[in-house]
Amino acid sequence: MATRTARTAWNGTLADGGGQVELTSSRVGTFDVSWPKRVADDADGTTSPEELVAAAHSSCFAMQLSALIGQAGGTPHSLEVRADVSIAPDPAGGFHIDGITLTVRGEVEGLDAAAFEQAAQEAKAGCPVSKALAGVSISLDAALV
């Protein structure tokens, strides 16, 4: 199986420094990161570990759900998946990812709302990124459109 790689170059202190995250395997881009923008309401053109986790989780979940819909006898015409990943102070010190909300809206042929919800719950539990994030509370809002 494949291994994917990303690389970060960081300069300076946490408060005053910054870095660039390079998506090395795909070569699709290099993106700025900084602590002040990571915890600000407006990311102002920078990414963050939480946004990258959200991208990984939403895409992994979409792939897993698509497979499960097919296994259940349905045909996924479109899936719109959003992952909201939040960071908060950790009671044990420092910060932690304190929750992820997955929201999916699907246009699916051959499944009713209950079967779609079941497939979505199975995708939430079974996608590799969900498994990697097992220590984080993950909620799901799934509905057909």
Image: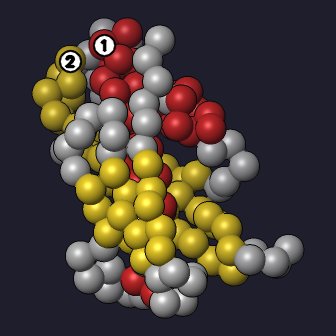
- Dividing the picture into quarters, in which one does residue 74 lie? top left
Picture residue at 37% right of the left edge, 57% below the top? 21
Picture residue at 16% right of the left edge, 34% below the top? 78
Tell me the distance, in whole angstroms, between the alpha carbons under discs 2 and 1: 6 Å
Q: Residue 68 in the image: state x and y as whole percent.
A: 40, 18
Using the image as rendered, state which of residue 42 and residue 125 is in the foreground.
42
Residue bearing mark 2? 75
Q: Residue 112 in the image: state x and y as whole percent.
A: 31, 28
Using the image as rendered, state which of residue 133 and residue 29 is in the foreground.
29
- Dividing the picture into quarters, in which one does residue 32 lie? bottom left
Residue extending farthest to the right is 92
Using the image as rendered, state which of residue 73 and residue 25 is in the foreground.
25
Q: Can residue 91 be seen in this snapshot?
A: yes
Secondary structure beneath dot 2 equals strand
Q: Residues within 10 Å of mark 1 (few under 14, many from 20)?
A: some
Q: Amino acid at mark 2?
A: Thr
Residue extending farthest to the front is 11
Lateral position of residue 78 relative to residue 53, left or right? left
Q: Residue 82 in the image: state x and y as whole percent.
A: 33, 54
Q: Residue 114 in the image: state x and y as whole percent.
A: 41, 32
Q: Residues within 10 Å of mark 2 (few under 14, many from 20)?
A: some
Task: Identify the mark nearer the N-term, 2 or 1.
Answer: 1
Q: Amino acid at mark 1?
A: Gly
Residue bearing mark 1? 70
